[in-house]
Amino acid sequence: MAVGKSVEGFGMSRIEAIKELLAEDPKDPDLHLMLGAELRNAGRFDEAAEALRGYLALMPATADIGAAYRDLGICLDRLGQKDGARETYRKGVEAANRHHHMGLQSEIEDLLKGLA
């Protein structure tokens, strides 16, 4: 990964590096997605949700974005935003189905069923 290589030895976290790249190119959806993934993995769900929303806003509705909806739904669920997670998971199911990702669709449906 280019981002991983760019931060080696510079004392900069991947999150900081992606944020710097995003400041230079805020319309790059891949950077939003990468930032969302890193922040989610770090347990920073509020920031991850913001980054994932940025990604989804830049992508056409017909794009293959089911996994981003899954990740956003997970963040919203962890933040206690059950209604938002439910709506987001439903969009993820639709996107996964549209692109014939049955495994992803099933995974998101399970997450949707698991909402209390």
Image (cartoon, grey):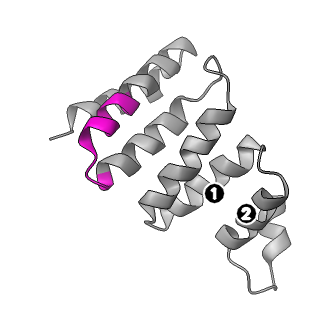
Residue 112: x and y, percent? 28, 32
- Please tell me whether mark 2 sits on a helix, a strand or a loop: helix
Vertically, is 42 above or below 36? below
81 within the magenta span:
yes
Q: Name the residue under label 1.
A: 35
Report the residue at 40% width, 32% height from top.
88
- Disc 1 residue type? Leu
1 within the magenta span:
no
CB atoms at circles 2 and 1 under 8 Å apart? yes
Label the magenta part by its dominant secondary structure: helix
In this view of the protein, can residue 33 be seen by the observer?
A: yes
Report the residue at 32% width, 27% height from top.
109
Q: Quadrant of residue 91?
A: top left
How many other residues sit within 10 Å of disc 2, few (<14), some (14-19) or many (≥20)? many
Vertically, is 8 above or below 62? below
Residue 107: x and y, percent? 37, 32
Residue 85: image tag:
none
Span shown in magenta: 78-89
Residue 84: x and y, percent? 33, 37
Report the residue at 81% width, 85% height from top.
10
Vertically, is 101 above or below 33? above
- Please tell me whether mark 1 sits on a helix, a strand or a loop: helix
- Disc 2 residue type? Ile
In this view of the protein, can residue 111 be seen by the observer?
A: no
Does residue 20 appear to the left or right of 82 in the view shown?
right
The quadrant in which the N terminus is found is bottom right
Does residue 28 appear to the left or right of 40 in the view shown?
right
Report the residue at 26% width, 36% height from top.
83
Residue 18: image tag:
2
